[in-house]
Amino acid sequence: MKKIIATLIAGLFASAAFAQTTTTATTATTVTPAPTKAEVKADAKADTKEAKAAVKADTKEAKATLKADTKQAKETIKSDSKEAKAAVKADAKEAKTAAKSSVKPPAEVTTTTHTGTHGADVSATAKTK
């Protein structure tokens, strides 16, 4: 595509330079033959090859960029998950130490049970009767 544009620009400059020259009546005009089908076909083939090469290069560049972005995203996710795991582990450790240091109930708790009262509290004087 760049070659086509360069050729067109060069042609414009050449035609501008040709137009500025003075023509004399004695000079013979030269007729350039029209391009043949083979020339047109060859030019079209060359243009197609250039376009395909440009598209291929763009695709390759896009794939490389996508691969780099994906790799960076994976690394970010991996580091974030490591940090989260470390935070959870630290919180669990703190909770465990807090549970160990909390107040424990006394080892022996005495309860008085009275048989035959169905769970009602019976005074000592009522027992003797």
Image (spheres, rainbow, N blue to C red):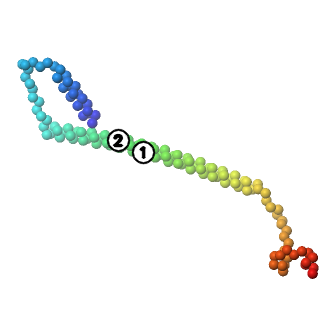
Tag 1, which secondary structure? helix
Residue labelled with disc 2: 58
- For the N terminus, the image quarter is top left
Relative side of 94 to 124, left or right:
left
Q: Which residue is mark 1?
A: 66
The residue located at (67%, 54%) in the rendering is 92
Which residue sits at x=85%, y=74%? 121
Name the mark on residue 34: none
Packing grade of label 1 (10 A; few <14, some 14-19, many >=20) is: few
Residue nearest the viewer, comparing 13 with 42: 13
Q: At x 93% / y 76%, what residue is drawn?
A: 125
Mark with earlier residue (1, 2)? 2
Residue at 28%, 40% (x, y): give it.
Answer: 51
Q: Quadrant of residue 54?
A: top left
Amino acid type, callout 1 = Leu
Q: Quadrant of residue 3?
A: top left
